[in-house]
Amino acid sequence: GAGVSQSPSNKVTEKGKDVELRCDPISGHTALYWYRQSLGQGLEFLIYFQGNSAPDKSGLPSDRFSAERTGGSVSTLTIQRTQQEDSAVYLCASSFGGGTANYGYTFGSGTRLTVV
Amino acid sequence: GNSVTQMEGPVTLSEEAFLTINCTYTATGYPSLFWYVQYPGEGLQLLLKATKADDKGSNKGFEATYRKETTSFHLEKGSVQVSDSAVYFCALRSPAGNMLTFGGGTRLMVKP
């Protein structure tokens, strides 16, 4: 599509349940990024994909968080056994990869996750 | 490593006032520099960018000049509007890398 698409836009879940967040990047963008933005805070990097591999997972806050990307396109961020501190807006972005520093990211509108 | 430092907000201005949001960076080589804007309830949008020293990025009345000697990329606008109220993020991207490094964001509030 024309932009980065994220779904769902809003998700309310009970503490302890698992959630899956989806990101559909811009066609042709080989790099995909997940960030988290807690209320009133800046951007917290979670994970980065180049193609289907994840060279940098350093931002994942715990082993309850995992992500995958298939076919060099759609990515899914999974949070297991959700906790209230997981409540945040999860942002996905995509870009042209490697050697193209002139390009910034294109962000999706985010998924607002609320754990009750 | 790379880092970006922005002035802390919130910045509160009256309509038609002059805006400056300071941004300085630390990076090896010659990074590309960006400003992103996040309007209330929305995702981040690219506002402007500059890819080499002395370049000036501009968009929607906003400007920022890539100053290598002071490692800065300050955002300016001559006359702000209420609709400019948002959070502004400065960011850099290294030539050899894929990652954008973001500053902490600066909230701008413009009052009528």
Image (cartoon, coloured by chain):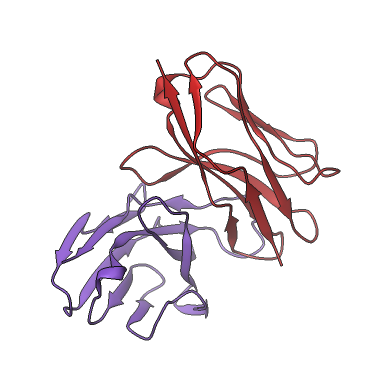
Chain colours: A purple, B red
Q: Is residue A22 left or right of residue A54?
A: left
Q: Is residue B67 left or right of residue A112?
A: right
Name the residue: 30% across, 42% down.
B41
Name the residue: 36% across, 46% down.
A2
Where residue A58 sits: x, y (%)?
A: 52, 78
Where residue A91 sits: x, y (%)?
A: 37, 58
Q: How many marks?
A: 0
Out of B59 and A96, give the one closest to the viewer.
B59
Q: Which residue is outermost to the bottom? A: A63
Q: Which residue is outermost to the right? A: B69
Where residue B99 sits: x, y (%)?
A: 59, 63
Name the residue: 15% across, 66% down.
A116
Where residue A47 sits: x, y (%)?
A: 46, 72
Out of A84 and B52, give the one closest to the viewer.
A84
Q: Is residue A36 left or right of residue A10?
A: right
Please determine whether, in this image, residue B27 is positioned above or below residue A40. below
Name the residue: 30% across, 69% down.
A86
Please determine whether, in this image, residue A114 is positioned above or below residue A3. below
